[in-house]
Image (cartoon, rainbow, N blue to C red):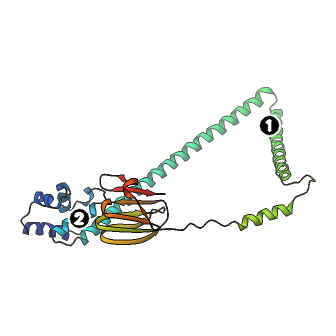
C-alpha cells in the first residue's frame, strides 16, 4: 500500500495546526473515520457509498490529492470481495464432497443388504444348492424379460400417441407444427433511457438487471444519460438535489424511495 498519501495528510494537518477533533468538527466526518484514514487502515472503513465521498472531502479540506488513496481503497475492496468469494467456493466444494461420500456409502449399504436378503430368500426355500443357483439365474432372466416387455410397452404407447384414428402417422400435421414453432421469434427487449440531473452535490449509483454499474460516482451540478435493462436499482445520496427521468418520464423519488442510514434506495421493475 502506498504510504505517501498518509504522510501527506499528517504533514498538511500539522502545518495547519489542526487536531483530528477540529478536522472532524469542520468537515462533519466522524473522528473514528479520520483516525483510521490517517493510520492507513482502509480495511476498517465502512462499506458505504459515502466512504469515497468522505475521503475526497477530507483530502480536499487539507489540500492533498486523493487519487492514490482512492486507488488503494479500490484495491482493498477488490481483495475483500475475492476472499469472500473464495471462502464461499471452498464451502461449496466441501459440501459436495461430503454429499458425494454420504450418497456413495448409503447406496453401497443398500445394494449389499438387498443382495444378502435375496441370497437368504432363495437359499432358505431349497436344500439343493444347484437348484438355488438355477432359480437365481431364472429369476434374473425373468426380470430381464419383464424389463424388455415394459420398454416395448412404453415404445408402443409413445408410438400410439402419434397415430391417428386410421392407425397411420399424421406426418403433414407434425411437419406444419415444427415449421410454425420455428417461425416464433423471441421478443426483443429494449433498454430504458435513463437521465440523471443533479443540482448541487449527490452520490449516485445505478445498477441494472445484469448487476452492471451504469453510474457509480459523486455528481456535482451535472447530468448524465445511460441505457439499462430492468429491474433498475438506484442509490441516491441526496435525493432532494436529484432528478430521475426514465424514457422521458420523471420519477417521483419521494413516493417510492426507501430510506437507509446513508442513502435512499429505489427499485424500478
Image spot of residue 49 (x, y percent): 31, 60
On screen, residue 85 above or below 124: below
The answer to whether residue 237 shows anywhere in this view is no
- The residue beneath circle 1 is 136
The CA distance from mark 2 to mark 1 is: 81 Å
Residue shown at 28% from the left, 56% from the top: 46
Residue shown at 83% from the left, 42% from the top: 146
On screen, residue 136 above or below 266: above
Residue shown at 81% from the left, 64% from the top: 175
Tag 2 near tag 1, CB within 8 Å = no
Image spot of residue 210 (x, y percent): 48, 63
> Is 85 or 170 nearer to us in this picture?
170
Q: Quadrant of residue 107?
A: top right
- The residue beneath circle 2 is 55
State which quarter of the image contains the N terminus. bottom left
Image spot of residue 204 (x, y percent): 34, 64
Amino acid at each position: 500500500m502506498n504510504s505517501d498519501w498518509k504522510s501527506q495528510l499528517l504533514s498538511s494537518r500539522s502545518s495547519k495546526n489542526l487536531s483530528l477533533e477540529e478536522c472532524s468538527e469542520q468537515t462533519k466526518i466522524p473522528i473514528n473515520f479520520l483516525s483510521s484514514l490517517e493510520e492507513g487502515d482502509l480495511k476498517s472503513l465502512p462499506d458505504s457509498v459515502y466512504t469515497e465521498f468522505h475521503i475526497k472531502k477530507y483530502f480536499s479540506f487539507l489540500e492533498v490529492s486523493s487519487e492514490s488513496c482512492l486507488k488503494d481503497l479500490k484495491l482493498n475492496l477488490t481483495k475483500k470481495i475475492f476472499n469472500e468469494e473464495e471462502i464461499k467456493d471452498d464451502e461449496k466444494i466441501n459440501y459436495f464432497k461430503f454429499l458425494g461420500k454420504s450418497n456413495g456409502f448409503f447406496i453401497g449399504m443398500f445394494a449389499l443388504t438387498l443382495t444378502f436378503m435375496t441370497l437368504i430368500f432363495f437359499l432358505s426355500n431349497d436344500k439343493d444348492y444347484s437348484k438355488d443357483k438355477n432359480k437365481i439365474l431364472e429369476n434374473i432372466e425373468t426380470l430381464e424379460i419383464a424389463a424388455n416387455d415394459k420398454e416395448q410397452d412404453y415404445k408402443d404407447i409413445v408410438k400410439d400417441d402419434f397415430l391417428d384414428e386410421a392407425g397411420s402417422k399424421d406426418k403433414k400435421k407434425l411437419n406444419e407444427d415444427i415449421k410454425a414453432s420455428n417461425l416464433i421469434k423471441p421478443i426483443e427487449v429494449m433498454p430504458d433511457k435513463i437521465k440523471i440531473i443533479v443540482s448541487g452535490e449527490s452520490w449516485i449509483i445505478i445498477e441494472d438487471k445484469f448487476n452492471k454499474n451504469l453510474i457509480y460516482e459523486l455528481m456535482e451540478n451535472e447530468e448524465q444519460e445511460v441505457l439499462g435493462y430492468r429491474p433498475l436499482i438506484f442509490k441516491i445520496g441526496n435525493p432532494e438535489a436529484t432528478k430521475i427521468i426514465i424514457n422521458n418520464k420523471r420519477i417521483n423519488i419521494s413516493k417510492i424511495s426507501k430510506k437507509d442510514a446513508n442513502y435512499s434506495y429505489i427499485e424500478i421493475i
